[in-house]
Amino acid sequence: MKRYDDLVAEALTRVQEIMPWDLSRSLAAGSKPILLDVREPAEFSMLRIPGAINVPRGVLEQSCEWDYDETVPLLAAGRELEIVVICRSGKRSALAADMMLRMGYRNVVSLRTGVRGWNDYEQPLVDAAGNQIDADTADEMLAPRLRPEQRKPKAN
């Protein structure tokens, strides 16, 4: 039986990752990749990399195809475009990038360490209104919020 981390590790054998500083330098040099954030809408509205678009992981495949309610024309027509897939930590984005590669996208990478790493590198994050979020506030917003029942039971 494969677990989540096993699936991510397997995807990473096929998916190229870039680091936040690589993306920052690329953007500063004038590159204009599609910044595809696959987090849930509530996560995206709290904070995001400026210029990112939100396509939740759960509707990604339909968003990449024509003739669905979730179709995102930019993606459906953009199999040759440069795309950087983003999530909170780099795991969901690795799975999403892997799926996009399987769907015929040619120039897709995953942002290693995700929005958390972007913030650790002190790059700008904004909220839904476009207001800049400072790094300390972003750290709090990005912190895991595990409830006790979500933790793995301890072996006796």
Image (cartoon, helix red, strand yellow):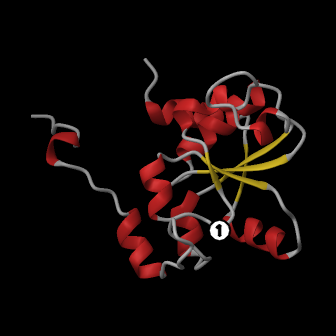
Looking at the image, residue 109 lies above or below residue 78:
below
Number of disc labels: 1
Residue at left offset 36%, top offset 63%: 143
Q: Secondary structure at mark 1?
A: loop
The percent coordinates of residue 150 (x first, y second) are 22, 41
Quarter of the picture containing the C terminus is top left
Residue at left offset 51%, top offset 47%: 39
Q: Amino acid at mark 1?
A: Pro
* Residue situated in front as seen by the camera: 144 or 6: 144
Q: Residues within 10 Å of mark 1 (few under 14, many from 20)?
A: some
Q: What residue is shown with label 1?
A: 50
* Residue situated in front as seen by the camera: 111 or 141: 141
Q: Residue furthest left?
A: 156
Quarter of the picture containing the N terminus is top left
Left-right relation of 140 to 101:
left
Left-right relation of 95 to 46:
right
Looking at the image, residue 8 lies above or below residue 19:
above
The percent coordinates of residue 52 (x first, y second) are 66, 58
Left-right relation of 86 to 6:
right
Looking at the image, residue 142 lies above or below residue 41:
below
The percent coordinates of residue 32 (x first, y second) are 84, 61
Q: Residue furthest top?
A: 1
Work out whether residue 1 can be spotted.
Answer: yes
Res 98 quadrant in image: top right
